[in-house]
Amino acid sequence: MNPIALIARKESGELLMSGRGLAWLLALSVIMSVLSLLLVSNTELSLLDNAQVVYMVMGTVTALGALLAVVLGSDTVAGERERGSLMPLMLAPVTPSQIVFGKMGGQVAGWAVMYLLSLPYVWAVGSSGQNLAQAVVYLALFGTPVVLGFGFLGIGLSARLRSVRSALLTSLITLMLLASPLLLGPSLRQSTIGKFFDAVNPFSAAVNTFDSVVIDSQPLAMQFTRLAVTLVWLALTTAFAIRSVRKMEI
Amino acid sequence: MLVEIRELKLNLGSHAVLRNVNLTLEKGQVYGLLGPNGAGKSTTISVVTGLRAPTAGSVSVLGLDPATDPIQLHRRIGVLAEQAGFYDWMSASDYLRWVAGLYRITLSKAEIASQLERVGLEGRSPASIATYSRGMRQRLGLARALINQPELLILDEPTNGLDPRGRREIHDVLLDLSANHGVGILLCTHLLDDVDRLCTRIGIIAQGQTILEGAIADLLSDQNAAVRYRLRVEPGETPDRLPADVTLRARAGDWWHVEVSSHIDPASAWRKLLDAGVRIDEIHREGGGLEDLYMAVTEAKEAA
């Protein structure tokens, strides 16, 4: 088997078989269950319409995915270093690029499991509306580059900072900064700085797309710029992770 | 020549970590790399394995330059690092199969069982590594280092955490590898007993410099480092029949504390004693030899 596939399989196994990974998936299920219940109740009381509820679930899944990705990413290299298992990996006939792509495979598996786990909840809140199919497709299309980008940022920081704690803290601060425009009021988001931030922020690009597609029913053709923003984010974080692991020293 | 290092220098930032390291290791030889903590032994190993590029000097390992050809080198060497980490949720057999995959080697169940048996871990393969003691982890680390049948084995404190019997078993594995399979072994350790039993050649590093290198027998002879023993003799024996190469240092009842010159093999000294009619009941080594040599050269370096 190719070393990339071997490392990816190990990373996925660690995530899905370890207590930490299972605890995360359980926590995700509980959060999504409670959120879905609240949102369905609001829909029944006509406080929110169906499209808004689907939009909120998509945003929440993306945010939780990004959070999982930075936690996992921050541990990938620095955690292995702290546990003493990085050196044997670096002394095997495996290139740094193969190590980083293998670890990225673990991130992809983590997000895939989370995405699949979220589908019943998307269906639960969106089955009575018109935009369920778009929600499923766009969550994959825009959520994937955003979430994986955060994971790769975590991997890069983990290789550079040599400490899980430092990498996790830096990744979380970055995630909070990128998610912060969503917390700003509409008037601030309409200011020049707010607009600029929205335009270059991958997190905003994904969430604004969910809004545009699910609530306003706009077509894919209107989302290309935002898709480009998320893809550029993914490309930049991938390059950062590869460069960081290549420059890494034991 | 498996390893040849000439005038190796390595700077980390503005700090010179290695200033002049020299080392030669031939096929089938066991080389002991010694030195005080922080002397540069582990850094030297990181250069030999291609994890760090030297600032100056030449390094050749199995005819390859580790800095430019690390992947080719890693295919042919086995390394047991001081901090032997594993994936604790795996079993030993799953772990070895996974590591073998990185070398693109497919191992059968029987081959994995044989690898585990070789290092004394037979019957433990289904248990997760999390349940392993430190000594068992060392053994598994050695099995990992041997997975690709390396031509050169680099071991950093391989007997750490092992009980005396475990140490002896690992020694036997290493001696078999060097004597019967021609594997060169670079052994980095603080345990002079390990060096005494395994190595034919040593290098002592202090403050980033090789201060002594060569065959142990030659170095002991050159330094005139006598080896001390404690003998228990039959009651009534007198030391006037001691041969010239054996000097009495002290005497307490039936116990004689003697020094054997580094120029002769201790076994021949005991034979001379027995031939002279001295009746010996017990022989215990007390020190001297390599230990005294190590202390002398490292203290001299510190004082300089």
Image (cartoon, grey):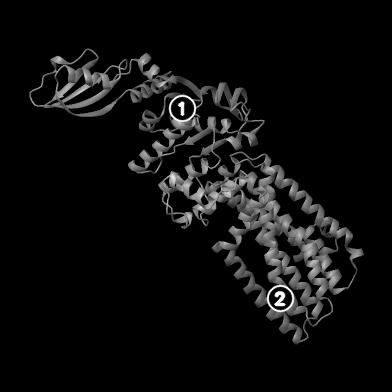
Dot 1 alpha-carbon crowd within 10 angstroms: few under 14, some 14 to 19, many 20 or more: many
Provide the residue designation for mark 2: A121
What chain does mark 2 sit on? A
Circle 2 SS class: helix
Asked if residue A203 is positioned above or below residue A124 in the image, the reply reads: above
The residue singled out by tag 1 in the image is B31
The one nearer the camera, A122 or B277, is B277
The amino acid type of the residue labelled 2 equals: Tyr
Badge 2 density bin: few <14, some 14–19, many ≥20, Cα 10 Å: many
Up-down relation of residue B147 to residue A7 (above or below): above
A43 relative to B284 in the view: left or right? right
- In percent of width and height, residue B302 lies at 42, 22
Q: Position of residue A112 (x, y in %)?
A: 70, 63
Which quadrant holds residue B53? top right
Between residue B49 and residue B295, name the one nearer to us. Answer: B49
Q: Quadrant of the N terminus of chain B?
A: top right
Between tags 2 and 1, which lies in front? Answer: 1
Task: Tell me the quarter of the picture where residue A50 sits.
Answer: bottom right
Q: Decide if residue A172 is in sight here.
A: no
Name the amino acid, label 1: Tyr
User: Is disc 2 in the same subunit as disc 1?
Assistant: no
Q: Is residue A151 left or right of residue B106?
A: right
Towards the viewer: A147 or B253: B253
Residue A175 point in image, percent of width and height: 70, 58
Depicted B251 relative to depicted B158: above or below: above
